[in-house]
Each structure stands twice: as C-alpha cells, then as structure tokens.
Amino acid sequence: MGKENIQSPFKTDTLTQKVALVTGGSSGIGLEIARQLGLHGAIVYITGRRKEVLDVACTDLQACGITACGLQGDVREQASCDRWLSEVESKHSKLDVLVNCAAGNFLVTAEELSQNGFRTVMEIDTVGTFTMCKSAFSLLKQSSSPCIINISATLQYGATWYQVHASAAKAAVDSITRTLALEWGQFGIRVNGVAPGPIEGTAGMTKLGPGDSKDLIVSSIPMGRMGKKWDIGMACVFLSSSAASFISGDTLVVDGANWMWKPPV
Ligand code: HXC
C-alpha cells in the first residue's frame, strides 16, 4: 500500500517533519505503528534484535513510500539504546515521537516460572521502556512537540491466568507513563500509553490466545470484533498529533471494551 492509497481519517501530513522511533518495530503491532506514523508523514526508525527481520520490515515500509531506517539491538542493553539515539541525533538532532513497543511474553503458571523468566519479561517490557525514555530524554527536549507512547496491555487491570510476569511488567509500564508525564511535562514532553486488547494476526494472539477459538474471543468483545493492528496504529497517530496536545499521563485502552466484559446475568 502506497501513500496514495492511504485509508485514514487523518490528513496525510499530520506528522510531517516529525522523527519517530519505534522499539520492537520490525514486526506485528510495532511495525504497523511505524507504518501508520510514516504514512502520516513521519520519518521512522524501527528497532529489533534480528537484522534480517529488520531489513525485511524496512523494505516493506519503504515500499509504502515511507522514509524508514532499521536499528539493530536489544532494549535490555543500555549500549543499544544509546547507540540508536546517537544515530537519530546525528541525522536529525531531535526526536519527536518515541514508541516503546518491544515486549516479551509467554504463558506459564507462577509455579512453573523461574526467577530468570520473570526477570526477562520485566527487563524487556519495563526496564527497556525506562531505559529508552531516559536515553531519548535529551533528544526529545530538542523537539517542539515531543511525545512518548508506551505500549501496554489490559491483562494487569484485574488478574490474568499464567501472566504474573507480563502483568507485573505492564503495570509498571503504566506507572512509568504517569510518573514521566508528571516529571517531564515541564519540558513539554507528553507521555501516554496505548493498551491493546485482542488484536488479530499478532504474536500475542498466537502465543497467548485460545488457539483457533476466534469466536470465543469475539463473544467477549462488546464491539463484536477482534482488533486490527491498524486500530493501534491510529491510536498512536492521534496521540502523536497536535490533536492530543493536552493529553498526557493517560493510557488509552483500544480493546472494543473487552477488558471489562462480564457474562450477562
Ligand atoms: C516458561 C520460559 C518460557 C516459557 C522462556 N522462558 N520461555 N519459561 N515458559 N514458554 C524462560 C526461560 O526458561 C529462561 O529462564 C528465561 O525465560 C529467558 O528465556 P530465553 O529464551 O533465554 O530468553 P530470550 O531468548 O531473551 O527470549 C525472550 C522471551 C521470548 C520473552 C522468552 O519469548 C521473546 O523474545 N519474545 C519476543 C517476542 C514476543 O514474545 N512478543 C510477544 C509479545 S506479546 P531460565 O530460568 O530457564 O534461565 C505481548 C502481548 C501482551 O506482549 C498482551 C497480551 C494480551
């Protein structure tokens, strides 16, 4: 899909001249976020661990007419994060939009989960998010309208079976979102989250969903459908745009009202 075929309620120049960096941007929801930011005018940098996957993703984005660049490394490593930001600084001297989307997850009972398994997910989701925010801080301050978007989840709102690690990690991410919004508002930096619900065609659904039971999932979504990666991309375009200039410290739930679903009495 090229820019001429864009299907969006937003103007295609909504994010023109903005520089965006999406961690975990080489596949899944992260790639779609990068695509939508790019289709709305942003220059996009995507990060990922595997170079071959990054290269395919960049080619895909460039085929859409987007200026895209891949940055290889791991959010768990401070040196990777610093190197990525140095690369952006050398080309643009600013960063307008940071999207923290890199995440790790698997289903496991608390009884079976090792300390290292718990720590691994905390390090990717929570420490990775903090490290990127911290590394990007000085470049974000060079932007006239900087923002951070932390990709969260809804599984931590109540409690979710087999997700003690990811629930703890995403609850902490939501806390980081609120605290940085408080501390960094004085620098004009808006900090928000997006919490996707069940999104079709993602690693989250393949790894964590109930197999082929799409009907079962849909029956617990008041809006009557699974989410699309596009839905998350649009939420990020909105939060990155000037339409959201007074929104900070919020996590926008994009789940068709799934998280609060209860069976009819
Ligand atoms: C139990 C497991 C496990 C599993 C790994 N571990 N997988 N424990 N069940 N299925 C344990 C390992 O035994 C090890 O602990 C520790 O975790 C680290 O595992 P590694 O394989 O060495 O880690 P690594 O290679 O760095 O891989 C990280 C990962 C992996 C998180 C384990 O799954 C990954 O990289 N995933 C990235 C992509 C991904 O999953 N994205 C999905 C995000 S979905 P020990 O003790 O043995 O050393 C998402 C949606 C949330 O976030 C919302 C859902 C609704």
Image (tube, helix red, strand yellow):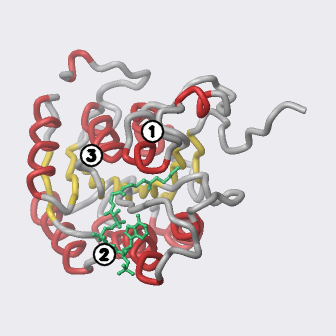
Query: Which mark sits nearer the N-terminus, 1 or 2?
Result: 2
Q: Would residue 158 be found to the left or right of residue 71 on screen?
A: right
What amino acid type should be assigned to the residue bearing mark 1? Ile
The answer, for residue 215, to whether it is visible in the render is yes
Looking at the image, can residue 182 be seen? no
The image shows residue 12 at horizontal and vertical percentages of 30, 26
Gap between marks 3 and 2 measured at Cα? 18 Å
* Contact flag, marks 1 and 2 (Cβ < 8 Å): no
Q: Is residue 244 above or below residue 11?
A: below
The Cα–Cα distance between marks 1 and 2, rounded to whole angstroms, is 24 Å
Between circles 1 and 2, the one closer to the viewer is 2
Residue 76: mark: 2
Residue 38 position, x and y percent, is 25, 37
Residue for point 79% across, 39% down: 262
First-in-chain label (1 vs 3): 3
How many other residues sit within 10 Å of disc 2, few (<14), some (14-19) or many (≥20)?
many
Mark 1 neighbour class, 10 Å CA radius: few under 14, some 14 to 19, many 20 or more: many
- Which residue is denoted by mark 3 in the rendering? 27
Q: Which mark is residue 232?
A: 1
Q: Nearer the viewer, residue 163 or 65?
A: 163
Whether residues under marks 3 and 2 lie with C-beta atoms below 8 angstroms apart, the answer is: no
Query: Is 220 placed above or below 51 here?
Result: above
Question: What is the spatial separation of the Cα atoms under label 1 and label 3, in whole angstroms?
Answer: 14 Å
Q: Quadrant of the N terminus?
A: top left
